[in-house]
Amino acid sequence: MSEKILVIAETKEGEIRNVSFEAIAAAKKIKPDGEVIGLVCADDDLENLAQELIYYGADRAITVKNDNLKSYTSEAFGQAVLAVVKQESPDAIIMGHTSIGKDLSPKLASKLESGLISDAIDIETDGDQPVFIRPIYSGKAFEKKVITSGIPFITIRPNNIAALDRDDSRSGNINNVDVDIKDLRTIVKEVVRKTSEGVDLSEAKVIVAGGRGVKSADGFKPLYELAEVLGAVVGASRGACDADYCDYSLQIGQTGKVVTPDLYIAVGISGAIQHLAGMSNSKVIVAINKDPEANIFNIADYGIVGDLFEVIPMLIEEFKKVAVS
Protein backbone atom coordinates (compact mmCIF):
# COMPACT_ATOMS: atom_id res chain seq x y z
CA MET A 1 0.00 0.00 0.00
CA SER A 2 1.40 3.39 -1.00
CA GLU A 3 2.03 6.00 1.62
CA LYS A 4 -0.50 8.80 1.97
CA ILE A 5 0.29 12.49 2.22
CA LEU A 6 -2.44 14.87 3.32
CA VAL A 7 -2.31 18.39 1.88
CA ILE A 8 -4.33 20.95 3.86
CA ALA A 9 -5.54 23.49 1.32
CA GLU A 10 -6.34 27.12 2.06
CA THR A 11 -8.99 29.23 0.42
CA LYS A 12 -9.23 32.98 -0.06
CA GLU A 13 -12.33 34.71 -1.37
CA GLY A 14 -13.75 31.42 -2.57
CA GLU A 15 -10.65 30.20 -4.41
CA ILE A 16 -7.77 27.87 -3.57
CA ARG A 17 -4.60 29.78 -2.71
CA ASN A 18 -1.65 29.08 -4.98
CA VAL A 19 0.51 27.90 -2.08
CA SER A 20 -1.85 24.92 -1.71
CA PHE A 21 -1.00 23.83 -5.27
CA GLU A 22 2.67 24.27 -4.37
CA ALA A 23 2.08 22.05 -1.33
CA ILE A 24 0.78 19.31 -3.64
CA ALA A 25 4.01 19.56 -5.67
CA ALA A 26 5.98 19.38 -2.41
CA ALA A 27 4.05 16.25 -1.43
CA LYS A 28 5.10 14.65 -4.73
CA LYS A 29 8.72 15.43 -3.88
CA ILE A 30 8.38 13.84 -0.44
CA LYS A 31 6.95 10.59 -1.79
CA PRO A 32 6.90 10.44 -5.61
CA ASP A 33 4.93 7.18 -5.53
CA GLY A 34 2.69 8.16 -2.63
CA GLU A 35 -1.00 9.03 -2.72
CA VAL A 36 -1.64 12.75 -2.35
CA ILE A 37 -4.93 13.63 -0.69
CA GLY A 38 -6.17 17.22 -0.84
CA LEU A 39 -8.30 18.54 2.00
CA VAL A 40 -10.43 21.66 1.76
CA CYS A 41 -12.61 22.98 4.59
CA ALA A 42 -15.24 25.71 4.27
CA ASP A 43 -18.93 26.48 4.65
CA ASP A 44 -19.81 26.56 0.96
CA ASP A 45 -20.01 24.20 -2.00
CA LEU A 46 -16.56 22.63 -2.16
CA GLU A 47 -16.85 20.34 -5.18
CA ASN A 48 -15.18 22.76 -7.61
CA LEU A 49 -12.42 23.64 -5.13
CA ALA A 50 -11.69 19.98 -4.51
CA GLN A 51 -11.58 19.36 -8.26
CA GLU A 52 -8.95 22.11 -8.62
CA LEU A 53 -6.72 20.22 -6.17
CA ILE A 54 -6.99 17.15 -8.38
CA TYR A 55 -6.24 19.15 -11.53
CA TYR A 56 -3.02 20.30 -9.84
CA GLY A 57 -1.84 16.84 -8.88
CA ALA A 58 -3.85 15.49 -5.94
CA ASP A 59 -4.93 11.87 -6.44
CA ARG A 60 -8.18 12.40 -4.57
CA ALA A 61 -9.78 15.03 -2.39
CA ILE A 62 -11.73 15.32 0.83
CA THR A 63 -14.12 18.12 1.72
CA VAL A 64 -15.40 19.17 5.12
CA LYS A 65 -18.40 21.47 4.92
CA ASN A 66 -19.63 23.13 8.10
CA ASP A 67 -21.13 26.51 8.98
CA ASN A 68 -18.39 26.96 11.60
CA LEU A 69 -15.77 26.93 8.84
CA LYS A 70 -16.92 30.15 7.18
CA SER A 71 -14.09 32.12 8.80
CA TYR A 72 -10.85 30.65 10.06
CA THR A 73 -10.45 29.80 13.74
CA SER A 74 -7.86 27.31 14.93
CA GLU A 75 -10.47 25.48 17.03
CA ALA A 76 -12.93 24.83 14.20
CA PHE A 77 -10.37 24.05 11.52
CA GLY A 78 -8.35 22.01 13.98
CA GLN A 79 -11.35 19.79 14.74
CA ALA A 80 -12.04 19.36 11.02
CA VAL A 81 -8.46 18.42 10.13
CA LEU A 82 -8.01 16.09 13.11
CA ALA A 83 -11.17 14.19 12.14
CA VAL A 84 -9.79 13.63 8.64
CA VAL A 85 -6.35 12.66 10.00
CA LYS A 86 -8.00 10.09 12.27
CA GLN A 87 -9.92 8.65 9.34
CA GLU A 88 -7.07 8.62 6.80
CA SER A 89 -4.01 8.00 9.01
CA PRO A 90 -1.68 9.86 6.63
CA ASP A 91 2.05 9.25 6.63
CA ALA A 92 2.77 12.99 6.31
CA ILE A 93 0.90 16.31 6.42
CA ILE A 94 1.81 19.45 4.51
CA MET A 95 0.39 22.96 4.14
CA GLY A 96 1.48 26.50 3.31
CA HIS A 97 3.59 28.60 5.68
CA THR A 98 0.99 31.36 5.75
CA SER A 99 -0.64 33.20 8.64
CA ILE A 100 -3.10 30.31 8.93
CA GLY A 101 -0.37 27.70 8.53
CA LYS A 102 1.76 29.33 11.21
CA ASP A 103 -1.19 29.29 13.61
CA LEU A 104 -2.72 25.90 12.83
CA SER A 105 0.29 23.63 12.24
CA PRO A 106 1.92 23.76 15.71
CA LYS A 107 -1.42 23.14 17.42
CA LEU A 108 -2.15 20.14 15.23
CA ALA A 109 1.41 18.82 15.50
CA SER A 110 1.18 19.01 19.29
CA LYS A 111 -2.10 17.10 19.39
CA LEU A 112 -0.74 14.48 16.98
CA GLU A 113 2.59 14.31 18.84
CA SER A 114 4.33 14.71 15.50
CA GLY A 115 7.45 16.55 14.45
CA LEU A 116 6.95 19.93 12.77
CA ILE A 117 9.28 21.54 10.24
CA SER A 118 8.10 25.01 9.37
CA ASP A 119 8.96 27.38 6.52
CA ALA A 120 10.62 24.81 4.26
CA ILE A 121 11.85 26.21 0.94
CA ASP A 122 13.02 22.98 -0.72
CA ILE A 123 12.96 19.22 -0.31
CA GLU A 124 15.74 16.75 -1.01
CA THR A 125 15.97 13.02 -0.45
CA ASP A 126 18.56 10.93 1.35
CA GLY A 127 17.66 7.42 0.24
CA ASP A 128 14.00 7.11 1.24
CA GLN A 129 14.33 9.88 3.83
CA PRO A 130 13.00 13.33 2.82
CA VAL A 131 15.26 16.19 3.88
CA PHE A 132 13.74 19.63 4.35
CA ILE A 133 15.69 22.83 3.79
CA ARG A 134 14.71 25.98 5.67
CA PRO A 135 16.33 29.40 6.18
CA ILE A 136 17.72 30.49 9.56
CA TYR A 137 19.34 33.65 10.94
CA SER A 138 17.08 35.91 8.87
CA GLY A 139 17.96 34.08 5.68
CA LYS A 140 21.74 34.28 6.13
CA ALA A 141 22.10 30.51 6.38
CA PHE A 142 20.14 27.36 5.69
CA GLU A 143 19.65 24.16 7.63
CA LYS A 144 18.61 20.66 6.61
CA LYS A 145 16.15 18.86 8.86
CA VAL A 146 14.51 15.45 9.00
CA ILE A 147 11.66 14.00 11.05
CA THR A 148 12.83 11.00 13.06
CA SER A 149 9.54 9.94 14.68
CA GLY A 150 5.85 10.64 14.49
CA ILE A 151 3.89 11.94 11.49
CA PRO A 152 6.00 14.47 9.57
CA PHE A 153 4.20 17.83 9.49
CA ILE A 154 5.62 20.38 7.07
CA THR A 155 4.77 23.95 6.14
CA ILE A 156 6.27 25.38 2.94
CA ARG A 157 7.11 28.98 2.15
CA PRO A 158 5.06 30.36 -0.76
CA ASN A 159 6.77 30.92 -4.13
CA ASN A 160 9.64 28.49 -3.51
CA ILE A 161 8.41 25.09 -4.70
CA ALA A 162 6.79 25.42 -8.13
CA ALA A 163 3.27 24.06 -8.52
CA LEU A 164 2.68 21.33 -11.09
CA ASP A 165 1.05 22.27 -14.36
CA ARG A 166 -2.74 22.27 -14.24
CA ASP A 167 -4.13 19.21 -16.02
CA ASP A 168 -7.87 19.33 -16.72
CA SER A 169 -7.84 15.67 -17.77
CA ARG A 170 -7.03 14.46 -14.26
CA SER A 171 -9.78 12.86 -12.25
CA GLY A 172 -10.10 11.48 -8.74
CA ASN A 173 -12.61 10.67 -6.05
CA ILE A 174 -14.02 13.53 -3.99
CA ASN A 175 -15.51 12.53 -0.64
CA ASN A 176 -17.23 14.68 1.95
CA VAL A 177 -16.56 14.02 5.62
CA ASP A 178 -19.14 15.15 8.17
CA VAL A 179 -17.48 16.60 11.25
CA ASP A 180 -19.36 17.67 14.37
CA ILE A 181 -17.55 20.90 15.23
CA LYS A 182 -18.54 21.91 18.75
CA ASP A 183 -17.52 23.55 22.02
CA LEU A 184 -15.98 26.53 20.23
CA ARG A 185 -14.62 29.22 22.49
CA THR A 186 -14.03 31.59 19.58
CA ILE A 187 -16.64 32.58 17.02
CA VAL A 188 -15.98 35.09 14.25
CA LYS A 189 -18.97 37.40 13.89
CA GLU A 190 -17.61 39.77 11.25
CA VAL A 191 -14.46 40.20 9.19
CA VAL A 192 -13.35 43.72 8.31
CA ARG A 193 -10.58 43.67 5.73
CA LYS A 194 -7.94 46.39 5.60
CA THR A 195 -5.72 44.58 3.13
CA SER A 196 -6.00 45.34 -0.54
CA GLU A 197 -7.94 43.00 -2.78
CA GLY A 198 -6.13 40.65 -5.13
CA VAL A 199 -2.92 38.68 -4.75
CA ASP A 200 -1.54 38.25 -1.24
CA LEU A 201 1.92 39.72 -0.70
CA SER A 202 3.40 36.36 0.24
CA GLU A 203 2.30 34.87 -3.09
CA ALA A 204 3.01 37.85 -5.36
CA LYS A 205 5.38 37.32 -8.29
CA VAL A 206 6.30 41.01 -8.54
CA ILE A 207 6.43 43.46 -5.61
CA VAL A 208 7.07 47.20 -5.55
CA ALA A 209 7.96 48.14 -1.97
CA GLY A 210 8.40 51.59 -0.48
CA GLY A 211 10.35 52.77 2.53
CA ARG A 212 10.84 55.97 4.49
CA GLY A 213 12.33 57.50 1.36
CA VAL A 214 8.86 57.93 -0.17
CA LYS A 215 8.41 60.66 2.47
CA SER A 216 4.60 60.54 2.77
CA ALA A 217 1.42 58.63 2.01
CA ASP A 218 1.20 60.58 -1.25
CA GLY A 219 4.69 59.34 -2.05
CA PHE A 220 3.25 55.85 -2.41
CA LYS A 221 0.99 56.91 -5.31
CA PRO A 222 3.73 56.54 -7.98
CA LEU A 223 4.50 53.10 -6.55
CA TYR A 224 0.90 52.02 -7.02
CA GLU A 225 1.02 53.34 -10.58
CA LEU A 226 4.21 51.40 -11.30
CA ALA A 227 2.69 48.30 -9.70
CA GLU A 228 -0.38 48.60 -11.90
CA VAL A 229 1.77 48.76 -15.05
CA LEU A 230 3.78 45.71 -13.95
CA GLY A 231 0.86 43.72 -12.60
CA ALA A 232 2.57 43.88 -9.23
CA VAL A 233 1.58 44.21 -5.57
CA VAL A 234 2.69 47.09 -3.34
CA GLY A 235 4.55 46.41 -0.10
CA ALA A 236 6.40 48.50 2.47
CA SER A 237 9.17 48.54 5.04
CA ARG A 238 8.37 48.82 8.72
CA GLY A 239 9.74 52.35 8.69
CA ALA A 240 7.12 53.42 6.15
CA CYS A 241 4.37 51.73 8.17
CA ASP A 242 5.55 53.30 11.45
CA ALA A 243 5.51 56.70 9.76
CA ASP A 244 1.84 56.16 8.77
CA TYR A 245 2.64 56.29 5.07
CA CYS A 246 0.67 53.05 4.60
CA ASP A 247 -1.14 50.31 6.46
CA TYR A 248 0.74 47.64 8.41
CA SER A 249 -0.86 44.99 6.20
CA LEU A 250 1.79 45.96 3.61
CA GLN A 251 4.75 45.42 5.94
CA ILE A 252 7.53 43.16 4.71
CA GLY A 253 10.32 42.05 7.03
CA GLN A 254 11.20 40.16 10.16
CA THR A 255 8.07 41.39 11.94
CA GLY A 256 5.97 41.53 8.77
CA LYS A 257 5.52 39.18 5.84
CA VAL A 258 8.27 37.09 4.29
CA VAL A 259 8.17 37.24 0.50
CA THR A 260 10.08 35.54 -2.32
CA PRO A 261 8.83 37.11 -5.57
CA ASP A 262 10.43 36.77 -8.98
CA LEU A 263 11.06 40.54 -8.94
CA TYR A 264 11.35 42.83 -5.91
CA ILE A 265 11.69 46.57 -6.50
CA ALA A 266 12.84 48.34 -3.33
CA VAL A 267 12.07 52.05 -3.53
CA GLY A 268 13.49 54.40 -0.93
CA ILE A 269 14.38 51.49 1.35
CA SER A 270 17.73 51.73 3.15
CA GLY A 271 18.08 47.98 3.73
CA ALA A 272 17.85 47.47 7.48
CA ILE A 273 18.57 43.87 8.47
CA GLN A 274 14.99 43.44 9.72
CA HIS A 275 13.64 44.29 6.26
CA LEU A 276 16.18 42.13 4.44
CA ALA A 277 15.04 39.15 6.52
CA GLY A 278 11.69 39.35 4.76
CA MET A 279 12.78 39.75 1.13
CA SER A 280 16.45 38.83 0.62
CA ASN A 281 15.56 35.52 -1.06
CA SER A 282 13.71 37.27 -3.88
CA LYS A 283 14.90 35.98 -7.25
CA VAL A 284 15.76 39.43 -8.67
CA ILE A 285 16.12 42.57 -6.53
CA VAL A 286 16.15 46.08 -7.95
CA ALA A 287 17.04 48.90 -5.54
CA ILE A 288 16.25 52.58 -6.09
CA ASN A 289 17.81 54.95 -3.57
CA LYS A 290 19.51 58.34 -3.68
CA ASP A 291 22.14 57.20 -1.16
CA PRO A 292 24.82 55.19 -2.99
CA GLU A 293 25.98 53.76 0.35
CA ALA A 294 22.55 52.37 1.28
CA ASN A 295 22.77 48.80 2.54
CA ILE A 296 20.06 47.66 0.14
CA PHE A 297 22.57 47.87 -2.73
CA ASN A 298 24.66 45.14 -1.09
CA ILE A 299 22.02 42.52 -1.90
CA ALA A 300 20.50 44.09 -5.01
CA ASP A 301 21.01 42.51 -8.43
CA TYR A 302 20.47 45.92 -10.03
CA GLY A 303 20.77 49.35 -8.44
CA ILE A 304 19.62 52.79 -9.48
CA VAL A 305 21.14 55.72 -7.58
CA GLY A 306 18.79 58.64 -7.91
CA ASP A 307 15.73 60.50 -6.68
CA LEU A 308 12.86 58.03 -6.69
CA PHE A 309 10.41 60.79 -7.63
CA GLU A 310 12.38 61.23 -10.85
CA VAL A 311 13.23 57.58 -11.45
CA ILE A 312 9.79 56.02 -10.90
CA PRO A 313 7.95 58.21 -13.49
CA MET A 314 10.64 57.35 -16.07
CA LEU A 315 10.27 53.64 -15.31
CA ILE A 316 6.50 53.89 -15.63
CA GLU A 317 6.77 55.49 -19.05
CA GLU A 318 9.31 52.92 -20.28
CA PHE A 319 7.30 49.97 -19.02
CA LYS A 320 4.19 51.39 -20.65
CA LYS A 321 6.05 51.48 -23.98
CA VAL A 322 7.07 47.86 -23.55
CA ALA A 323 3.49 46.89 -22.66
CA VAL A 324 2.12 48.62 -25.77
CA SER A 325 4.70 47.07 -28.09
Image (cartoon, grey):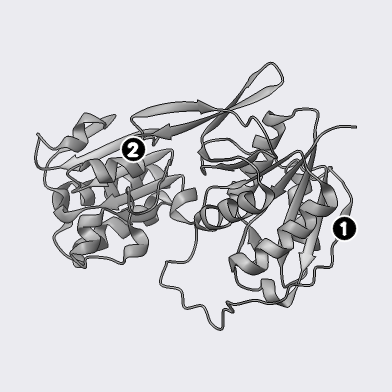
Q: Which mark is residue 80?
A: none
Amino acid at pointer 1 = Asn
Amino acid at pointer 2 = Ser
CA–CA distance in space, label 1 to label 2: 41 Å
Sequence order check: which comes first, mark 1 or mark 2?
2
**Residue 113, position as x, y percentages in the image:** 66, 46
Image point 51% across, 78% down: which residue?
A: 191
**Residue 228 versus residue 307 in the image, above or below:** below
**Residue 204, position as x, y percentages in the image:** 46, 49
What quarter of the picture does the C terminus occupy? top left
What quarter of the picture does the N terminus occupy? top right
The crowding category of the residue bearing disc 1, from other C-alpha atoms within 10 Å (few below 14, some 14 to 19, many at least 20), is some
**Residue 272, position as x, y percentages in the image:** 20, 43
Dot 1 corresponds to which residue? 175
Is residue 107 in view from this perspective? Answer: yes
Q: Quadrant of residue 298?
A: top left
Dot 2 corresponds to which residue? 138
